[in-house]
Image (cartoon, rainbow, N blue to C red):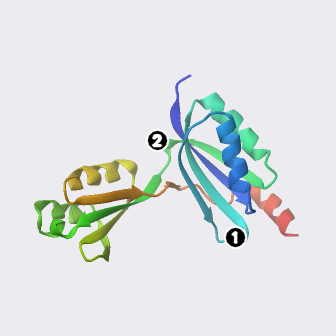
Amino acid sequence: MKKENYLLTIKAEDRPGLLHLVTGVIEKKLIPIKSLSYAPTDIHDIILITIEVTGDENELAQLALKIENIIEVFSVEVTLYNSAVCLRAAYFKMAKAFLESPKAMAMSNYDTVMVNIYQDAILLAKYGTDATIRKLYNALDGPDLLGFSQTGLISDSGLIGHDDIERIIGLAA
């Protein structure tokens, strides 16, 4: 089977060691993790974990079932990466001389925000898809680019599905 990038969107009750359990299941299956995001939600003690992995459809279906067997996990949604809206935040540390170069136009061309000014550098931020961030990186690449990093991806998965509601209400009781 063909290996592709997938997103695992996991809704779970927050507890110490949960992330270790989830990543342990993935590592045991020898499935590479490309990106991971772990964040609280507006519902007390419910977290959303988004993991980008590479594998085939059968591997990911089995993996989702294994992760759903973890007691704290309410649900696991598996989505092909290319069929989901996936965004990241990217940060570019630029030399101050960049502001006077022709490449500075990239800031407005890519809706980039200046988030911090240092004595000899500036920090730019961009929120967008992998493709947009890659294009911006290519536009900024050169001697003025002092550093680059990006966050794990954020997907547009709904927080609580109809099937999750009864289970969460049972935990709250």
**What residue is at 73 percent from the left and 49 percent from the top?**
21
**What residue is at 65 percent from the left and 31 percent from the top?**
59
Q: Name the side, left or right, on which 149 lies relative to 55.
A: left
Q: Residues within 10 Å of mark 2 (few under 14, many from 20)?
A: few
Q: Name the side, left or right, on which 6 lies relative to 129.
A: right
Residue ranking furthest to the right: 173
- 39 up-or-down from 27: above or below: below
Q: Secondary structure at mark 1?
A: loop
Q: Residues within 10 Å of mark 1 (few under 14, many from 20)?
A: few
- Residue 108 percent coordinates (x, y): 22, 66
Specify the quadrant that holds the C terminus: bottom right
Q: Name the side, left or right, on which 108 lies relative to 44.
A: left
Specify the quadrant that holds the N terminus: top right
- Residue 40 percent coordinates (x, y): 64, 67
Q: Which mark is residue 43?
A: 1
Q: Earlier in the sequence, mark 2 or mark 1?
A: 1
Amino acid, disc 1: Ile
